[in-house]
């Protein structure tokens, strides 16, 4: 048996109310309670860590007699563990709900298993309804669950020969306006933008996401890593979000802290030392290399050392797109996984 | 007045016989003599330095009475100077030719002016007939005249981050088979392939142009630059052409000597020191950078120092094509000339 027309409409509504909740540490989830005849009785959504889950929010709006035999439609599998709230699967069982329709399985090791518990209690459980739409909504949160940390994009601009600047440090501008506008659009899709203190001291970046002079609606939180002090008049201190400062270089710890703050997507903007550290640690889920048709030579490399001694240890990438941006080229790449073909056979020179 | 049908046919034939001559220091030129009624009386072509020019070769096949009032059809403007042969323009005047049709103007400062001399002597002179076909035939020679030296392509393979090898020197293979096959095709279009002794000692390249294991029909002459000795058993010594060795690093002098040997197109294959020297000297008319989706970091750079201190001195390029080759990308580029727009405006980070 698949979802009824009333359940499909309820799921679309549940996805809509889910968006009212905050993006962050917890997923955005929505729920709708239907009467046995398919009438919409109540909706609910999750308002963030420490508040009731969406199902419980919806249940709480109804009298016990309305719930018996009802159908619950939820965008994510009802959870099975007792955190700051009790397990939602048990709440639905206790309420006497007859049927549960949800979109996505809960990927959590701790929180998963709700469907199983409800089926064991005799509830008719249906999964997968509008799963694609639900995944589009909380895909970044799911990625965080899978990785165990925020998703990391490492971005840099370089000359064709791999330099970030000329020998004297001058670098404005290696890439053109099309490439720089693209960077701003991608900054706006991140929750946090990370730089090293070296970059703050050298370039004094604003770390805002802009369209021309105008700020884009979503601004990533600026994060500065390094032991040197950020000057009181640094541009980053005038960012719409108060900057976060981490004096250590333990990237895992920084990412864990950012995750706890609800950061799902991290955009690492440099400089070379920080970018190299993320790549060397295997923490670059995406690489964005903006390549300008310029030759610079000299010592100022876009990547420094990434722990590769022999060609067999190379960080091989899959370039999903070589995207021309005016005279420049953006390589949109991700790490090659062991199962993928490298297309590098034998040969000789 | 433009060329007659008989003259057009004669030019096509002249271009055909021109190809019988050798490619090299002198251009490939063909000539045809037509009777006043448009009958083809004789053809001729240039067989290389020190031999008669095409017009003189054709004239020599006919009796003086056949030449009076005849039309000469030549693929290149008859020359106006006395070198190892007399000026062809004067030979045509002396022969009593009534009309001359040629394809391309002679670009030479010394040899040009033939058309003017002939017109002054009362000959009807027509230029530009099938100029495109003639330019396709001797374009490389024309480029050599314009540059005053052979055309230079500087090629290298690099990781995305600009390295030619891993820290331990291993580099087989950074790029994939599609990129390597492309290199062989382009080698076959060159007259000489240039490497430094460092590359010979490190990689022992064959420097042949191959399709798989088979040698391609045209093989560039291998040229080794540097003071170190090439081992007796080096692969380059088994090349179909005897290698040329230059112990100095004066690139202008090397190119001048190669020009004297009839080399029109030079393919510089490395390593980093030699490639950087050509770029730094402004001698790279074309850059071919084969970029692999690999990150290596470390000290082995595809380009070392190219004399750039500040961003204003950057060697800016025009990339005519970003050509995907399997997983790799070939940047086909040439120096940006001062008149071209760089599309790099103001902005801020």
Image (cartoon, coloured by chain):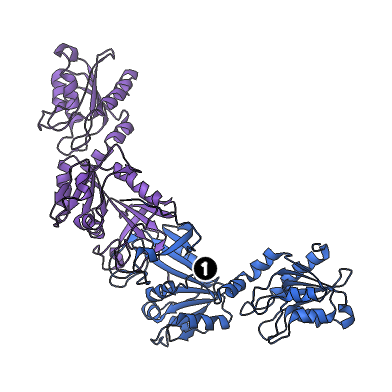
Chain colours: A blue, B purple
Q: Quadrant of residue A216?
A: bottom right
Point 27% across, 44% down: residue:
B208
Instruction: Assign the N terminus of chain B to one quadrant of the image.
Output: top left
**On screen, residue B21 above or below A149:** above
**On screen, residue A154 above or below B129:** below
Q: Is residue B20 left or right of residue A239?
A: left
Q: Nearer the viewer, residue A196 or B90?
A: A196
Q: Position of residue A136 (x, y in %)?
A: 64, 66
> What secondary structure is marked by label 1?
helix
**On screen, residue B82 above or below A109:** above
Q: Nearer the viewer, residue A321 or A179?
A: A321
Point 13% across, 20% down: residue:
B94
Q: Residues within 10 Å of mark 1 (few under 14, many from 20)?
A: some
**Residue A240 visible here:** no
Chain of the residue displaying label 1: A
Q: Is residue A186 left or right of residue A103?
A: left
Q: Position of residue A329 (x, y in %)?
A: 43, 59
Q: Is residue A78 left or right of residue B74?
A: right
Q: Is residue A110 left or right of residue B309?
A: right
**Residue A126 visible here:** yes
Q: Position of residue A124 (x, y in %)?
A: 82, 70
Q: Quadrant of residue A82?
A: bottom right
**On screen, residue A68 above or below A288:** below
Q: Nearer the viewer, residue B172 or B68?
A: B172
Instruction: Assign the C terminus of chain B to one quadrant of the image.
Output: bottom left
- Residue highlighted by disc 1: A186
């Amino acid at each position: 048996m698949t979802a009824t027309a009333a359940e499909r409409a309820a799921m679309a509504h549940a996805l809509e109310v889910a968006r009212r909740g905050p993006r962050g540490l917890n997923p955005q989830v929505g729920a709708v309670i239907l009467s046995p005849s398919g009438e919409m009785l109540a909706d609910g959504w999750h308002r963030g860590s420490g508040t009731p889950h969406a199902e419980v929010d919806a249940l709480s709006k109804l009298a016990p007699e309305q719930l018996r035999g009802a159908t619950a439609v939820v965008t994510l599998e009802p959870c099975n563990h007792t955190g700051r709230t009790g397990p939602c699967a048990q709440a639905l069982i206790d309420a006497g709900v007859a049927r549960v329709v949800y979109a996505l399985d809960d990927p959590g090791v701790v929180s998963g298993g709700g469907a199983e518990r409800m089926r064991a209690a005799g509830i008719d459980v249906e999964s997968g309804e509008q799963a694609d739409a639900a995944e589009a909504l909380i895909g970044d949160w799911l990625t965080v669950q899978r990785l165990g940390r925020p998703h990391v994009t490492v971005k840099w601009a370089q000359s064709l020969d791999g330099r970030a600047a000329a020998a004297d440090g001058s670098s404005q501008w290696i890439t053109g306006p099309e490439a720089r506008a693209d960077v701003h659009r991608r900054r706006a899709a991140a929750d946090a933008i990370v730089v090293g203190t070296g970059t703050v001291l050298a370039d004094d970046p604003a770390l805002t996401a802009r369209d021309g002079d105008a700020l884009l609606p979503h601004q990533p939180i600026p994060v500065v890593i390094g032991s040197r002090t950020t000057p009181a008049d640094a541009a980053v201190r005038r960012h719409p979000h108060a900057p976060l400062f981490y004096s250590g270089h333990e990237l895992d710890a920084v990412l864990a802290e950012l995750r706890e703050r609800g950061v799902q997507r991290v955009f690492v903007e440099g400089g070379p030392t920080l970018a190299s550290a993320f790549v060397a640690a295997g923490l670059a889920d995406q690489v964005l290399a903006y390549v300008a048709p310029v030759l610079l030579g000299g010592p100022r490399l876009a990547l420094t050392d990434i722990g590769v001694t022999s060609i067999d240890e190379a960080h091989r990438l899959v370039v999903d797109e070589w995207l021309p941006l005016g005279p420049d080229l953006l390589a949109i790449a991700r790490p090659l996984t062991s199962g993928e073909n490298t297309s590098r056979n034998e040969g000789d020179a």
